Image (cartoon, grey):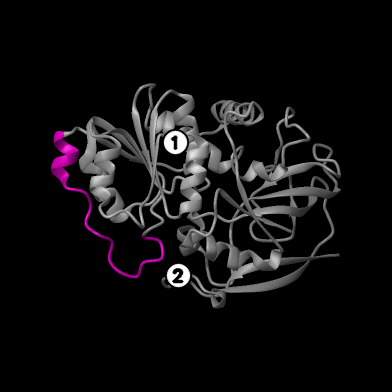
């Protein structure tokens, strides 16, 4: 019998999450049946979508999410003991899987690369950046791309892929440390949205001709200021709206319809699970290759200790992180 610690949603969020919303529980896992494996978490991810997805949980349910785990006991020949996998097991230290939804690391994964990247740049957040920019925005060389939350897990990859494709990239972030990081990544223009006098004027100065593509991680008032500066036939990938997730007020009105109509803009929301099969595998190979070649840099914000899952989640929602937020068990 193996004890598994799990963080559950004790009480639904109202406004910003607090420690009182979570409860740590321990359960004894049963013995394995044929075809099953016992997983031990190595790294877990916290992501903004969890703030919204938790609305679908019942109070007492375990928090959802991916982890990189090691098979510690196996009755499934496809996953012998010692295999490292990506699993959607939730906020738990140990879990039992029948193997159907487990994903092994790519065969070409080098020993020098942290396995935690399978939760970030070469995982869900990297894929979100890849498909949002290349499929939803359909970005082309020579275009101008605007990214907000540009030093976050998704935004930092968006900007680097855009540069690889020959674009001019403008990024907004919320601290001087993050601005320095964006400049290191090769952003053409980076600004601190918290300290500029006028967001509208800053955006105009960064790209007087406007923007072809807008990769939106923030939503709210920020988008209302960007959208009027889109070029004709501009494309907007709506990935997230982190500025509104903890708000208890009604959302702000959307952008003026005439901007969308007369500039003939295309806005599309998306979630990364849309892309499966061969296209997903190709994207993962591209991302891994770019990381190995040094064309995409990564930065992980790692907090140690499973007991720190709620605090790390709350900090990520406030923007404490530079790059991808990970909890090391």
Q: For residue 118, which quarter of the picture? A: top right
Residue 190: horizontal and vertical position, in percent?
40, 42
Q: Nearer the viewer, residue 40 or 59?
A: 40
27 to 141, vertically: above or below:
below
| Number of numbered discs on residues | 2
Q: Which residue is mark 2?
A: 16
Q: Which residue is mark 1?
A: 187
Q: Which of the two labelled residues, at mark 2 and mark 1, occupies the earlier sequence position?
A: 2
Q: For residue 220, which quarter of the picture? A: bottom left
Q: Nearer the viewer, residue 47 or 40?
A: 47
Is 168 placed left or right of 46 in the picture?
left
- Magenta residues span 244-262
Is 18 placed left or right of 171 in the picture?
right
Is 257 placed left or right of 93 in the picture?
left
Write the residue at 54% across / 27% down: 279
216 to 65, vertically: above or below:
above
Can residue 272 be seen from the camera position used here? no
Q: CA distance from mark 2 to mark 1?
A: 31 Å
Can residue 255 be seen from the camera position used here? yes
Other-residue count near label 1 (Cα within 10 Å), few / some / many at <14 / 14–19 / ≥20: many
Assess whether residue 106 is covered by the magenta stretch.
no
Write the residue at 64% across / 57% down: 90
Which mark, by number, is residue 264?
Answer: none
Q: Nearer the viewer, residue 117 or 164?
A: 164
Of tags 2 and 1, the one toward the viewer is 1
Assess whether residue 245 is covered by the magenta stretch.
yes
Write the residue at 65% across / 60% down: 91
């Amino acid at each position: 019998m193996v004890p598994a610690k799990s963080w559950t949603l004790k009480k639904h969020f109202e406004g910003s999450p607090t420690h009182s919303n979570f409860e740590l529980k321990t359960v004894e896992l049963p013995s394995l049946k044929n075809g099953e494996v016992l997983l031990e978490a190595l790294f877990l991810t916290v992501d903004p979508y969890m703030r919204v997805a938790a609305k679908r949980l019942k109070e007492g349910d375990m928090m959802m999410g991916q982890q990189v785990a090691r098979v510690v006991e196996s009755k499934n020949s496809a996953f012998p003991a010692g295999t490292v996998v990506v699993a959607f097991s939730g906020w738990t230290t140990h879990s039992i899987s029948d193997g159907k939804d487990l994903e092994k690391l790519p065969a070409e994964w080098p020993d020098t690369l942290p396995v935690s990247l399978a939760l970030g740049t070469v995982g869900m957040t990297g894929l979100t950046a890849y498909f949002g920019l290349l499929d939803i925005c359909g970005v082309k060389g020579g275009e101008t791309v605007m990214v907000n939350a540009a030093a976050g897990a998704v935004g930092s990859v968006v900007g680097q892929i855009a540069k690889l494709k020959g674009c001019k990239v403008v990024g907004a972030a919320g601290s001087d440390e993050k601005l320095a990081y964006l400049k290191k990544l090769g952003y053409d223009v980076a600004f601190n949205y918290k300290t500029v006098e006028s967001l509208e004027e800053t955006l105009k100065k960064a790209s007087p001709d406007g923007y072809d593509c807008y990769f939106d991680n923030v939503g709210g008032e920020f988008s209302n200021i960007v959208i009027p500066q889109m070029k004709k036939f501009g494309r907007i990938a709506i990935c997230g709206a982190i500025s509104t997730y903890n708000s208890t007020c009604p959302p702000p009105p959307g952008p003026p319809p005439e901007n969308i109509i007369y500039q003939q803009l295309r806005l599309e929301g998306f979630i990364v699970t849309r892309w499966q099969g061969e296209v997903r595998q190709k994207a993962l190979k591209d991302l891994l290759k770019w990381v190995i070649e040094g064309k995409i840099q990564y930065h992980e914000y790692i907090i140690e200790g499973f007991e720190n899952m709620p605090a790390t989640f709350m900090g990520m929602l406030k923007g404490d992180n530079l790059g991808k937020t990970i909890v090391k068990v």
